[in-house]
């Protein structure tokens, strides 16, 4: 008997008990739909985490001034004064894996515009900072190298500062007061949102030339941090080692002594986020797969009932020449058809549930074609695995006993 004929017979057998077949498929539908929806949520979370980390900068490393021990008290990160501008020029000159670097210092500031004021973070840096951070401008432009050389009173603001200070007013060209000093707003950065690594609002910031901050506001001549961009993400680990070795040598740190600086590689954060998201995806997919296994048990149960109901039919088939292989194949095909129909409806249900989750909860979901292919293969495997025993049972029936069965 050819395969198409077997499939047609299977379809007729399943159609004779439509309600029972539909209820049997329900377990497969729920299982496949749950797997696709949960995997989509997990992969969406993974993609969103990677996007947030990528938004922080291009192959970025963060070199920060370290801690210091004063009278037995560790003062925390940023307490040392050993990180200086010459360290930045040495990094650019002697670390071949480094593409660009920008200095940085920071302070808290109360900013005033008209009758409004806002407390925010004030950072001093240089123009290459915006390229390293991959941070485009919504309006205006960066301050220039000449502004840095002349310690000009110019500022670039983030979206949060714009909302709280300017409202509907165009900020470009306006004058704000930072710690009672007038600054001209020359640029507005595009919104980046919350940092995945730090959990801070990246848009609540004002950036000014590093020389302006050091000479006119803080009076400090050391750096709080240096933003570094490696030539590639793979090279970021080599850059981290090169920077660490260089700064230990420049700061005359002996073997066994703690560093007076800290180098953070965003690639580490990205890898950790990726591992956590994958673990979450595997966990939720495993939980959802339980319902698919339950659905498979339902398929086996119904197929065993079908074998019992059709014992006389099996005997007649064998009496007119059907072999054990033919009978086994017939019932196995019925189980697979049942599972595939349930899997197809489950795929549609899972995709619809994914978009419903996005619309209701606002979660990021990513429907992967691989998840759909895996669901089809898995549903077929469920049909074969849970249909094999009933099919084998049918094939081993004694034809004479089967014909006598009432």
Image: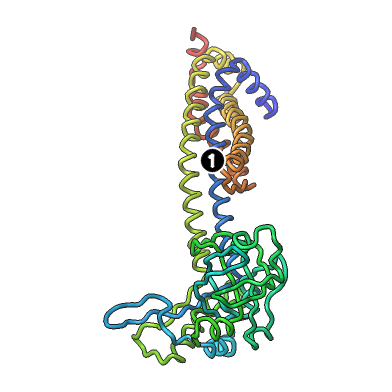
Q: Is the residue marked by circle 1 packed among few (<14), some (14-19), or many (20+) residues within 10 Å?
A: many
- The quadrant in which the N terminus is found is top right
Seen as rendered, the residue at the extreme front is 115
Q: Position of residue 361 (x, y in %)?
A: 56, 42
- Looking at the image, what colour scheme do you see? rainbow
Looking at this view, is 196 or 127 the one in front? 127
Q: Is residue 308 above or below residue 197?
A: above
Q: Residue at x 60, y 69 (%)?
A: 57
Q: Position of residue 404 (x, y in %)?
A: 49, 8
Q: Position of residue 355 (x, y in %)?
A: 62, 41
Which quadrant holds residue 114? bottom right
> How many marks are shown on the rendered structure?
1
Q: Secondary structure at mark 1?
A: helix
Looking at this view, is 338 or 108 the one in front? 108
Q: Is residue 20 above or below residue 86?
A: above
Q: Residue at x 69, y 86 (%)?
A: 146
Q: Residue at x 51, y 19 (%)?
A: 307
Looking at this view, is 303 or 170 the one in front? 170
Q: Is residue 131 above or below residue 328?
A: below
Looking at this view, is 336 or 132 the one in front? 132
Q: Residue at x 40, y 83 (%)?
A: 259
Q: Position of residue 252 (x, y in %)?
A: 41, 92
Residue that carries the numbered disc 1 in the rendered image:
35
């Amino acid at each position: 008997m050819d395969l198409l004929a077997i499939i047609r017979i299977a379809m007729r057998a399943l159609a004779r008990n439509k309600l029972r077949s539909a209820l049997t498929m329900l377990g497969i539908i729920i299982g496949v739909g749950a797997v696709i929806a949960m995997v989509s949520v997990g992969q969406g979370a993974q993609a969103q985490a990677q996007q947030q980390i990528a938004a922080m900068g291009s192959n970025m490393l963060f070199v920060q001034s370290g801690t210091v021990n004063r009278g037995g008290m560790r003062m925390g990160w940023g307490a040392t004064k050993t990180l200086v501008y010459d360290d930045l020029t040495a990094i650019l000159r002697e670390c071949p894996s480094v593409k660009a670097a920008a200095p940085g210092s920071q302070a808290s500031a109360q900013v005033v515009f008209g009758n409004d004021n806002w407390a925010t973070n004030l950072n001093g840096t240089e123009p290459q900072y915006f390229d390293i951070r991959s941070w485009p401008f919504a309006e205006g432009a960066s301050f220039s190298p000449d502004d840095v050389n002349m310690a000009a009173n110019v500022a670039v603001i983030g979206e949060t500062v714009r909302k709280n200070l300017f409202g509907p007013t165009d900020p470009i060209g306006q004058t704000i007061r930072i710690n009672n000093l007038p600054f001209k707003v020359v640029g507005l950065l595009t919104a980046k949102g919350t940092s995945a690594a730090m959990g801070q609002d990246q848009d609540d910031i004002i950036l000014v030339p590093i020389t302006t901050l050091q000479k006119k506001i803080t009076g400090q001549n050391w750096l709080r941090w240096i933003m570094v961009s490696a030539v590639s993400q793979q090279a970021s680990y080599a850059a981290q080692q090169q920077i660490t070795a260089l700064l230990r040598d420049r700061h005359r740190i002996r073997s066994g002594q703690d560093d007076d600086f800290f180098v953070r590689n965003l690639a580490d954060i990205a890898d950790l986020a990726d591992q956590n998201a994958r673990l979450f995806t595997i966990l939720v997919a495993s939980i959802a797969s339980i319902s698919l296994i339950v659905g498979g048990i339902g398929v086996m149960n119904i197929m065993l009932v079908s074998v019992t109901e059709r014992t006389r039919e099996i005997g007649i088939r064998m009496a007119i020449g059907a072999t054990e292989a033919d009978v086994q194949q017939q019932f196995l095909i019925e189980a697979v058809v049942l599972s595939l129909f349930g899997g197809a409806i489950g795929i549609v249900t899972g995709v619809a549930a994914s978009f419903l989750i996005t619309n209701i909860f606002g979660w990021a979901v990513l429907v992967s074609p691989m998840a759909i292919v895996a669901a089809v293969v898995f549903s077929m495997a469920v049909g074969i695995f849970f249909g094999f025993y009933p099919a084998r049972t049918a094939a081993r029936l004694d034809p004479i006993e089967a014909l006598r069965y009432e």
